[in-house]
Image (tube, rainbow, N blue to C red):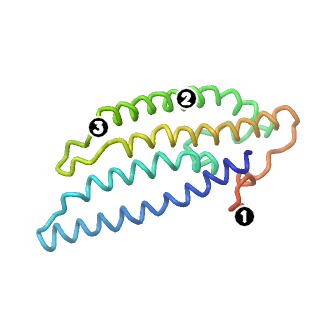
Amino acid sequence: MSRIISAVNEWLGRAVSFLLAAMMLTICYEVVARYFFDRPTTWSMELNTYLLSFYCLLGGGFTLLRNGHVSVDILFSRFHFRTKAVLNCLTSIFFFMFVLGLLWMGWDMAANSWKYHETSGTILDWPLFPTQVMVPVGSFLLLLQGLVKIVADFRTALTGIPPGDAHAGSIFHRKPEE
């Protein structure tokens, strides 16, 4: 099951990375249209806000899979791997509290957005539901990847067996260069 979760987050993380290319193209188009032809677009800013929302919210599980979230590890990096695993299990309590709160509140926000047909209120007046539903979806994917991580940390803490490669559960696995 952990391989499937990791593979889904890996695939999704790679897929949403293409949103950055789309954002770059639309911003470049906006700059050229605005400053060279004096014809700014009405849609570029809002579209890029939506794309950035999708990118950030759907990339959380991928970032956790790759251990890419910001952390302060001045002392942590000096600990034995088993001690690190125990500390990871303890600090995961805060992670799960935050992600479960985000999932719950995000679901409530998305449900209200759907129920009341909320829109952006801009000139395009796009519906807010597509971006707001990404909050619980992204939170759920992050939660699942967090479960994969805590199971691995718990196993390391109990058995003392060193953790494997962080990407071993991924179908896109490749050995890190040493």
Image side of residue 155 versus residue 40, left or right: right
According to the picture, the residue beneath numbered tag 1 turns out to be: 174
Residue at the spot 18% in from the left edge and 58% down from the top edge:
42
* Circle nearer the N terminus (2, 3): 2
Q: Residue furthest front?
A: 115
Residue at the spot 44% in from the left edge and 33% down from the top edge:
106
Q: What secondary structure is marked by label 2?
A: helix
Q: What secondary structure is marked by label 1?
A: loop
Give amino acid for label 2.
Answer: Leu
According to the picture, the residue beneath numbered tag 3 turns out to be: 117
Residue at the spot 26% in from the left edge and 69% down from the top edge:
29
Question: Residue 112: x, y in percent?
Answer: 35, 30
**Looking at this view, is 158 or 62 the one in front?**
62
Quadrant of the image occupied by residue 92: top right
Give amino acid for label 3.
Answer: His
Callout 2–callout 3 Cβ contact below 8 Å? no
According to the picture, the residue beneath numbered tag 2 turns out to be: 100
Image side of residue 93 versus residue 23, left or right: right
Crowding near the residue tagged with mark 3, few <14, some 14–19, many ≥20 C-alpha atoms within 10 Å: few
Question: Residue 148: x, y in percent?
Answer: 70, 41
Marks 2 and 1 sit apart, C-alpha to C-alpha, by 31 Å
